[in-house]
Image (cartoon, rainbow, N blue to C red):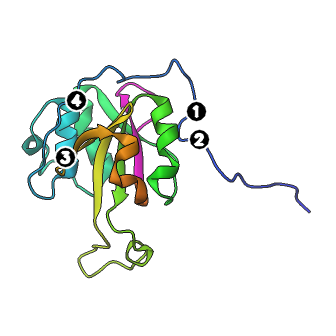
Amino acid sequence: MSTFKSNRDTPIWAANKEENYFRERDIQLINQRGPTCVSTCLAMLTGKRPEDFQGNINTQDPVTWSAALHPYGMKLAYCPHDARKLKFYIDELIALDDLFGLSFYTTNDPEQILNDPDSTGFVTQSHFILLHRDKIYDSAGFGCGLARDHYCLEHHTKRIFRVLPVEHNRGL
């Protein structure tokens, strides 16, 4: 009989206090027009316009988001997570004191999140925001505010990314 036990949890990022890449980055909030949270966040990261990314990325494919950041010296790296609410990750993310992209489901109904896709492939709405140090930049009209006060904390996690320099060994 095996004595192996699977791990119950993992850190979002292996802690290394010296490892920070975009701690001093200046982010200017841009309010999105229409369902453009991904392109608007990419614009906030790069100083470009959301329209510069629209049509060049697939809003459901983070590999294309990361590729769009490469010319600006950045890329995205997936962080380990599951579908728990963002409130269970926020303290660890803030402690890392860097730059992250967070995606969450906008519904709190688990049945909608776990639903089968419709004929177009759609399951349910989600939203993408930036976490820089202890502040969230939300392009959907919520502005910039303290992460611990943002409504996303009560929503289930879809994706967590760390923003990295393009030459980093991790990332998409």
How far, Cα to Cα, is label 3 from label 4? 12 Å
Task: Give the image location of residue 124, x and y in percent.
Answer: 31, 71
Task: Give the image location of residue 113, x and y in percent.
Answer: 40, 71
Task: Give the image location of residue 58, x and y in percent.
Answer: 22, 54
First along the sequence among labels 1 and 3: 1
How far, Cα to Cα, is label 2 from label 1? 6 Å
Relative to residue 74, is residue 119 depicted above or below? below
Q: Secondary structure at mark 3?
A: loop
User: What's under tag 3, amino acid-wise?
Assistant: Ser
Q: How busy is the neighbourhood of tag 4: few (under 14 within 10 Å), some, or many (20 plus)?
A: some
Judged left or right of residue 130, residue 49 is left
Residue at mark 1: 14
Query: Residue at 29% across / 46% down in the picture?
Result: 129
How far, Cα to Cα, is label 1 from label 3? 29 Å
Judged left or right of residue 58, residue 4 is right
User: What's under tag 2, amino acid-wise?
Assistant: Pro
First along the sequence among labels 2 and 3: 2
Q: Which mark is residue 27?
A: 4
How far, Cα to Cα, is label 4 from label 1? 25 Å
